[in-house]
Amino acid sequence: MTTNDARPLRVFQWIVPRSGSTVFTKCMSFVDDTEVWMEPYYTCVMNETVKNPEWGVGIPAMDKMRALIAQFEHHEEFVAMKEKEVEMANKYKNVFQPSDFNYPWLKKQLEIDPKDKKVVFIKDQSFAINDRLEYLPDVPTRHTFLIRHPQEVYTSLKHICTNNVDFLTLPWDEFHLGNDLPYLPIKDLFKIHRDHWKFVKENLDPDTVIIDSFDLTSKPEAILPKYLKNLGIPFKESYLQWEGDPELVFSSWRGSSEAVLTAPQTKVTGRAVESTRFDPPKYPRGTSRPEWKITDELKEYIEGAMPYYEEMYANRLI
């Protein structure tokens, strides 16, 4: 990677789903001279898979998913969401049309130096880049990783998939994470995350930083200053609390209009974009809400992910 200090530093935060990353991203929005990107590589994945009518044709799981998406999109509440997205996208010039996103285009966008910024913070999924590393921007770059215990991740992911919006809920026992989300490498999310970390550490950034979501939310006053120090970013006490108004998100975050403007209208990121601080955990690390039943597929995925999580956890920032 290029190391020209005159250019704004790109800081990647690589994640697995449901790891508390959007709250962290909102926190970073208030760090001086920082621009934020919201999962742009993931948007590229969506365009190549779910939104590509030629992808997965004839695969029963994909046919089922597309039928469910069609049902979702015909609800009047969803139609209203999309109308609001179009209206807001015309107002906020920091967002792009989802169809703009592809890997070569995104690489060029991330290489553009924003005016009056010292840091460009990019939050994204490890699985969206791990085999497309040639599309990382060729600019001064640091890589950081956010982890969360697999039980917390997988149960939260199942919850958000079955209860994302009030007008369309799905039965917990009938929804199968691995079978019903065929575009996501559900079983291997943590392996991909670990493999991406190891490759980055050995080839791109030997000083990678790992933080655990439970650590961060339990003691942000200890973890956040160390995180920023590792990146050469000065810490301020004011970074531990921020404004709740989501207007800052809408008007400054860069990414697709769906990621920045519509997702906050759902339970995917709605609470996070209105957050004002890192709320302390409600349950001990490695546990989840009692009502979130550990179904057979959840048990399989949690147990399979543990060795990769534990390896990264042993190397976390403390």
Image (spheres, helix red, strand yellow):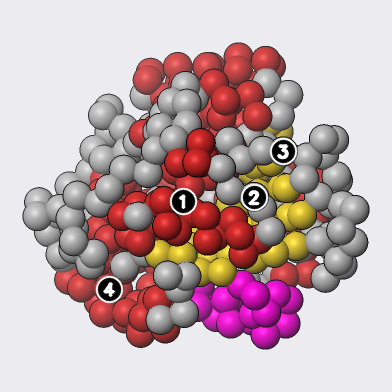
The alpha-carbon separation of the residues under discs 3 and 4 comes to 39 Å
Q: Position of residue 68 (x, y in %)?
A: 36, 42
Choose mark 3 or mark 4, whichever is in front.
3
Please tell me the numbered disc located at residue 21. 1
Label located before the other in sequence (4 or 1): 1
Quadrant of the image containing the N terminus: bottom right
Q: Please, what secondary structure does the residue beneath circle 3 have?
A: loop
Amino acid type of the residue tagged 3 in the rendering = Asp
The alpha-carbon separation of the residues under discs 2 and 4 comes to 37 Å
Quadrant of the image containing the C terminus: bottom left
Choose mark 2 or mark 4, whichever is in front.
2
Q: Please, what secondary structure does the residue beneath circle 4 have?
A: helix
Label located before the other in sequence (2 or 4): 2
Q: Position of residue 91 (x, y in %)?
A: 67, 15
Look at the magenta stretch and give its main secondary structure.
helix
Crowding near pointer 4: few (<14 within 10 Å), some, many (20+)? many
The magenta stretch is 189-208
Mark 2 — residue? 234
The residue shown at (63%, 34%) is 253
Q: Position of residue 144 (x, y in %)?
A: 58, 64
The alpha-carbon separation of the residues under discs 3 and 2 comes to 11 Å
Choose mark 3 or mark 2, whichever is in front.
2
Crowding near pointer 3: few (<14 within 10 Å), some, many (20+)? some
Mark 4 — residue? 302
Q: Please, what secondary structure does the residue beneath circle 1 have?
A: helix
Label located before the other in sequence (3 or 2): 3
The alpha-carbon separation of the residues under discs 3 and 1 comes to 20 Å
Amino acid type of the residue tagged 1 in the rendering = Ser
Amino acid type of the residue tagged 4 in the rendering = Ile
Please tell me the numbered disc located at residue 33. 3
